[in-house]
């Protein structure tokens, strides 16, 4: 009963995290329209860090072991550092809806990485599904035409793919470290490392923004508090209680949330070929999750 309750809590947290992450693509597009990307992400990390510092007494377990620094550093470098650099580049060139679709590749990338790094078995169906989904993403990118929301969709989706590669390293690192560190600590460390990293990039790339509208401020606050603290905290909690492959499968919900919110708030649309390509991505993801039922064992005579 206790195990079932913990699993249900993890599922609820993961669904909420996906809904928030889906909305983050839209919030980033809104913020990037007023403030340069590196300053937006620095503000996001700084606000998140302040929340974690204020709530540090509830940090939970910290069980450092020799050599953990490599995995902790790898986690932070993967995400937020490199992940947000690639995502910022992506959203400057593609639409929030298309970027959200590319995130559907994450569960497959995690499965492939787990096969290569951890020796986990990958089925033929998963491999075919991975190739199908990649084909769908390529078709999605090639089918798009440049517009105000996606000035260079092929380049933008390419950058978003690399963001998903970084996210793969992050998921595997969280799963490995979650037995010794609470979701709070892992999420806080991401924010703490992100502050100096993105401050340096911001200072090197653009002058300090002096005038930001209320909408831009709300978008940055939403990203810093709700997304950085809320979504990552919920996701890290879910990953700590479910297998990495199962937890990463919830990422398939992000494209649905991001597309719906982008249509409602930004008036973004996908053309017919892009809709078909998006369906191909989901087919590939679904195929990768297929598990044939085991044949029932023959009854054994009683002794």
Image (cartoon, rainbow, N blue to C red):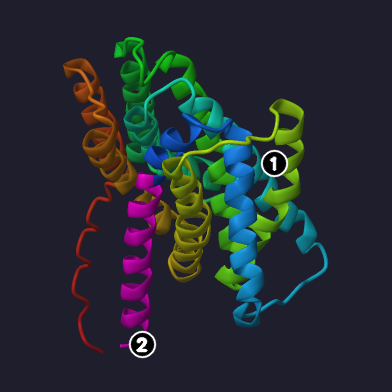
Give the number of callouts. 2
- The answer to whether 177 is drawn above or below residue 166 in the figure is below
Spot occupied by residue 56 in the image (x, y as percentages of width and height): 65, 76
Q: Quadrant of residue 188?
A: bottom right
Q: Is 53 displayed left or right of 135 in the figure?
A: right
Q: Which residue is mark 1?
A: 198
Residue at position x 64%, y 38% in the image: 82
- The answer to whether 265 is drawn above or below residue 240 in the figure is above
Q: Element type at marker 1? A: helix
Depth check: give the residue in front, 187 or 228. 228
Q: Is 236 displayed left or right of 74 in the figure?
A: left
Sequence-wise, which precedes: disc 2 or disc 1?
2
Depth check: give the residue in front, 59 or 2. 59
Q: For the magenta stretch, what is the residue range? A: 1-23
- Within-10-Å neighbours for mark 1: few <14, some 14–19, many 20+: many
Q: Mostly what secondary structure, the magenta segment?
A: helix
Residue at position x 47%, y 39% in the image: 213
**Is residue 181 visible in this depiction of the protein?**
no
Q: Is residue 2 magenta?
A: yes
Q: Which residue is mark 2?
A: 2
Quarter of the image that includes the N terminus: bottom left
Q: Is 138 displayed left or right of 236 in the figure?
A: left
Q: Element type at marker 2? A: helix
Q: Is residue 262 magenta?
A: no
Spot occupied by residue 241 in the image (x, y as percentages of width and height): 45, 71
Cα distance between the residues tagged 2 and 1: 41 Å
Quarter of the image that includes the C terminus: bottom left
**Is residue 221 visible in this depiction of the protein?**
yes
Residue at position x 63%, y 35% in the image: 209
């Amino acid at each position: 009963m206790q195990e079932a309750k913990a699993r249900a809590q993890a599922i609820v947290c993961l669904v909420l995290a996906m809904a928030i992450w889906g909305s983050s693509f839209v919030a980033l597009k809104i913020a990037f329209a007023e403030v340069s990307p590196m300053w937006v992400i620095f503000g996001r990390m700084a606000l998140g860090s302040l929340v974690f510092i204020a709530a540090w007494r509830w940090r939970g377990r910290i069980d450092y072991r020799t050599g953990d620094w490599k995995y902790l550093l790898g986690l932070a470098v993967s995400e937020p550092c490199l992940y947000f650099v690639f995502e910022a580049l992506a959203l400057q060139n593609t639409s929030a809806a298309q970027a959200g679709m590319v995130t559907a590749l994450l569960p497959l990338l995690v499965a492939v990485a787990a096969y290569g790094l951890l020796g986990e078995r990958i089925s033929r169906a998963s491999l075919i599904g991975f190739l199908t989904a990649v084909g769908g993403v390529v078709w999605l990118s090639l089918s798009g035409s440049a517009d105000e929301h996606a000035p260079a969709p092929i380049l933008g989706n390419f950058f978003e793919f690399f963001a998903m590669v970084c996210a793969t390293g992050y998921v595997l690192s969280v799963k490995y470290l979650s037995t010794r560190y609470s979701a709070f600590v892992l999420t806080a460390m991401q924010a703490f490392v992100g502050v100096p990293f993105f401050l340096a990039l911001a200072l090197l790339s653009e002058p300090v923004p002096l005038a930001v509208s209320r909408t831009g401020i709300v978008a940055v606050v939403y990203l810093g508090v709700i997304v950085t603290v809320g979504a990552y905290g919920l996701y890290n909690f879910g990953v700590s209680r479910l297998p990495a492959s199962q937890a990463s499968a919830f990422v398939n919900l992000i494209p649905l949330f991001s597309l719906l919110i982008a249509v409602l708030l930004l008036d973004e649309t996908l053309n017919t070929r892009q809709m078909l390509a998006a369906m191909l991505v989901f087919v590939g993801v679904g195929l990768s999750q297929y598990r044939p039922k085991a044949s029932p064992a023959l009854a054994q005579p009683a002794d």
